[in-house]
Image: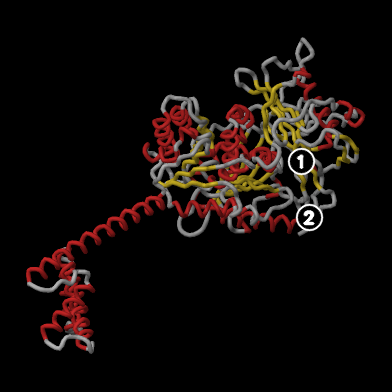
Amino acid sequence: MERQRPTSLRDRARYRFDTTLARSTGMLVSWLVLSCLAVVVPVSALVVWTDPGSPRSLSGRLSAVWRTSAETLRLGAPTGAPMRMALSVLLGIVALLCVSTLVGVITTGLGERLAELRRGRSMVLEQEHAVVLGWSDQVFTVVGELVAARAGARCVIAVLADRDVAEMEEALTASLGRGSAVRLVCRSGSLTTVDTLALVTPRAASSVLVLPSEAPDADSEVVRILLALRAVLGDEAGPPVVAAVRDRRQLPAARLAAGDRGTIVETDATTARLLVQSARRTGVGEVLRDLLDFSGAEFHLMEVPSALRQDPAGSRFGDLLLCFERAGVVGLLGPDGRPRLSPAPDTVVGPEDRLIVIAHDGVPKAPVDCGEYVDRTAFAAPQPDRAGPVRVLLLGWNRRAPLLVEALRDSVTPGSVLDVVVDDGQATPVEDRAGSAPATARLTVSCRSGDLLHPESLNGLDLFGYDTVIVLGADAVDGPGHPDDRVLVTLLILRELELQSSRVLPVVAELGDHRNRALAPLGPASDVVIRGELTSLLMAQIAHNPHLSAVFGELFAAHGASVHLRPAHHYTPPGCEASFATIVAAARDRGECAVGYRRTDPQADTGHRHELRLAPAQSERRVWNARDEVVVVATDSAGPDQPHGTLDAVPGMRHDRGDDTALSG
């Protein structure tokens, strides 16, 4: 056994000194006084003894040492009787203690105040500002859209979350850009505490948005935040409140907690429906993102112009579709607040109905007659119905997968097939969840396990026998890595197989981080859905215009009208030159509302060169090619090519070609 080294005298002395300092404040002061005297007195004596003008007697020099030491320590320098010198020392010590205490109090107060400001604990005294409660990946999209909605106006956004204020400000500033004119006010604290919520002054805000966190109990936390917010706002009329929950089972509680002023959005259900819509036709996600952000055309409400109410019997909805040069009419909002998207063309517009339009820069200009631009000879002949059962491959599983299966079951024709492939360790729970809904003749669900990161496993699935492939990411990853990593690797394998076979493979992938969109290796018929992005855009739109809440609820409902991309040859023959008004009129005859188009460069080998134009001029003329697509708002049963419960045919898919389409790398 190794002998312990003897403790040195220096270590023992240091230990004694540290122990003495730790006893009390008095001991610390005593050591401080002794240290000062040990330095000041010898140095003062040296100064006096080396001064040629100092007194010659010992008593005179000692008096000079006393005066020098007393002046250095600010104790006063009177000489004379010992009592007089003792009183001088007492006064000096009292003055020193008072000044030191005052400096300490001021320093401590300023330090605590600065620390409080850094922690974000001061009151926000603003009016008509936007309040964002919570922190997640959605906060960057929400704050960015709130800034875009108030472009050109004074914009103050208060963000309250249980995070460090400096980190929040740095992250949001980096997302918005250093040159942004918005003023961000970040505060930190518990979101479920009434006193903390009062810091951001929600009573004076123009809107309040509640974001769910990434925690497992995020929905329950949203309900508690809404209850605390309700306690702060009281029963008086206040700002509109928009919140998001992930699990639909929390919807009733969230709606009760939000009250009449609140609107609740389902994150997982919206993402699942967007995945299904993107699987129906590539590009729908891009159209919805463009419609819901504030950078281009978006939804607006407007009164029916008096010039269009000349007919005592009332205007017909179909007649209004060609009355605005730069706006697309898509529906009516009744006086009861219930929307009707893409109603029948012969629907009578009531005196109190408002128009739901898609336009740039707010309300469109005065109505004009665009019927003169319509060329009925350029209408395409009716297209035969080629819809039938589809085969869908689902790679991966997460909490949104059951909602996706449900949405697919409601949107396919009888005889369709859904094959689910998950990692080996996930086989049993997937079978239980996918089989939880009763199997019907409409959709047959089968599950199998495999290694999604192994090319041989995917190559043995007969990928090109499916109409579409959906790739889901995990909800969370244990250990290092990101949930999107597995999706990106799976997409890379699918893209490599696509290039090797020179065949088009329609793929829709779900990603969690919008920054990974640029990294995703996508083919010509592939698309990416960012989880939570559409919900963030919806929340910003509703917060900016609460009257649109019912419109979006109808647009993203499981049944009813929704956004579609139709082949342009359904409206006008390929190679025909026609105005957009002609497309609108042709779509009206099919019971649809055309609001834009998606142009594809016919010279592009892979079909990546798309140009999306929403609310174009009705007078705009162009030559429509076979790859062009028309953006329409229509019910699932509208149009002969799209009966209820089918997937739209995607260019390059089995339904659109008799042979395989060649691809280039």
Of 158 and 128, which appears nearest the observer?
Answer: 128
For badge 1, the amino acid type reads Arg
Bin the neighbour count of mark 2 within 10 Å (Cα to Cα): few under 14, some 14-19, many 20 and up.
Answer: some
Q: Establish if 258 lies above or below 432.
A: above
Apparent side of residue 233 relative to residue 631 in the rendered image (left or right):
left
Distance of label 2 from label 1 (alpha carbons): 26 Å
Of 148 and 524, which appears nearest the observer?
Answer: 148
Identify the residue position indicated by label 1 in the image: 613
Residue located 15% across and 69% down the image? 30
Q: Position of residue 574 (x, y in %)?
A: 88, 39
Residue located 90% across and 41% down the image? 575
The quadrant holding residue 285 is: top right
Q: Position of residue 14 (x, y in %)?
A: 19, 77
Which quadrant of the figure contains the N terminus?
A: bottom left
Apparent side of residue 66 relative to residue 579 in the rendered image (left or right):
left
Apparent side of residue 301 relative to residue 592 in the rendered image (left or right):
left
Apparent side of residue 225 relative to residue 392 in the rendered image (left or right):
left
- Which label's residue is closer to the chain start, 2 or 1? 1
Q: Establish if 280 lies above or below 519.
A: above
| Viewer-side label of 2, 1 | 1
Q: Position of residue 557 (x, y in %)?
A: 61, 30
The answer to whether residue 421 is visible is: no
Coloring basis for residues: secondary structure
For badge 2, the amino acid type reads Leu
Of 279 and 604, which appears nearest the observer?
Answer: 604
Residue at disc 1, secondary structure? strand
Identify the residue position indicated by label 2 in the image: 663
Q: What mark, if any, has residue 507 been given in the picture? A: none
